[in-house]
Amino acid sequence: EVQLVESGGGLVQPGGSLRLSCVASGFSVSTIYMSWVRQTPGKGLEWVSVIYSDGRGGSTYYADSARGRFTISRDNSKNSLDLQMNSLRPEDTAVYYCAREGITATGQRGAFDLWGQGTMVTVSS
Amino acid sequence: QSALTQEASVSGTEGQKITLSCTGDSNNVGSYAVGWYQQVSHGPPKTVMFGNSLPSGIPDRFSGSKSGTTASLTISGLQPEDEADYYCSTWDYSLSASVFGGGTKLIVL
């Protein structure tokens, strides 16, 4: 079955760190673009970061809110995607989803075609 | 302020045809595939349209299109279970980021 399963969320104090993981089944994370997307309670979806496939050099990009504090990475041996979050702030409180960015039949990128169930991160003292 | 603009809410009656829109610019919607995601009661998003393709398991009453810098999601024959929040997203070349719309709350009357 093709699926994504996140883990690693929890309660952390401001300034603390947390590492999220997303294990993929049914496909290889090394061959496709993978992103983290978050959702603050009651608000909309916010993109956090993307890591490109090995074939595209594994380049990484971040939202302004994440740059310098979060690091996205991939463990091909575990077929997993990680997000190391440092210097956490209360405004980072959200459900974090990993998402696969597929390629359409016409060869276009841009849309997510698979989502995990999410993991909750709460930053509070 | 979201990079992509969506209606805040849309309502329709069962069986009606409704269209949701997602407006961006040439750096995003005009250049890349747009995804549409359904979110029921703040559960995980589910992709209901991938570019102009219907993912497996999604009813064919859902359809997608794009004209210039506006993408649309049409639901023909609205059903009570279609009541949800709908988000659109795509890649933005100038921002080097994926961007989302603010979401549309679809109410089935």
Image: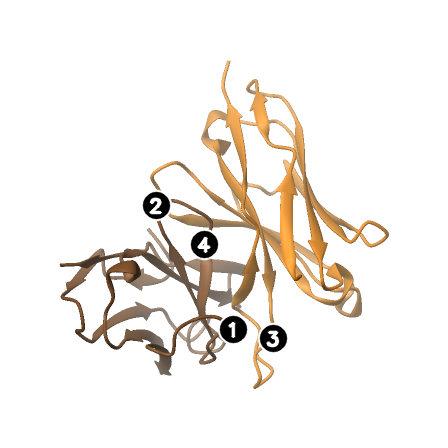
Chain colours: A orange, B brown
Residue to which mark 4 is pinned: B45
In three-dimensional space, the C-alpha distance between marks 4 and 2, rounded to whole angstroms, equals 10 Å
User: The residue tagged with tag 4: helix, strand or loop?
Assistant: loop
Nearer to me, B35 or B82:
B82
Question: How far apart in space, not on screen, are marks 3 and 2 (Cα)?
Answer: 28 Å
1 or 4: tag closer to the N-terminus: 4
Q: Which residue is mark 3?
A: A103
Say yes or no: labels 3 and 2 on the same chain.
Answer: no
Q: Position of residue A79 (x, y in %)?
A: 78, 53
Residue in the foreground of this view, choosing between B25 and A23: A23
Q: Which element carries disc 2, helix, strand or loop?
A: loop
Q: Position of residue A34 (x, y in %)?
A: 65, 58
Mark 1 lies on residue: B56
Q: Amino acid at mark 2?
A: Ser
Residue at (58, 21) in percent of width and height: A12
Left or right of B67, for residue A19: right
Co-location on one chain, circles 2 and 1: yes
* Chain ID at mark 4: B
Report the Cα–Cα distance between label 1 and label 4. Answer: 15 Å
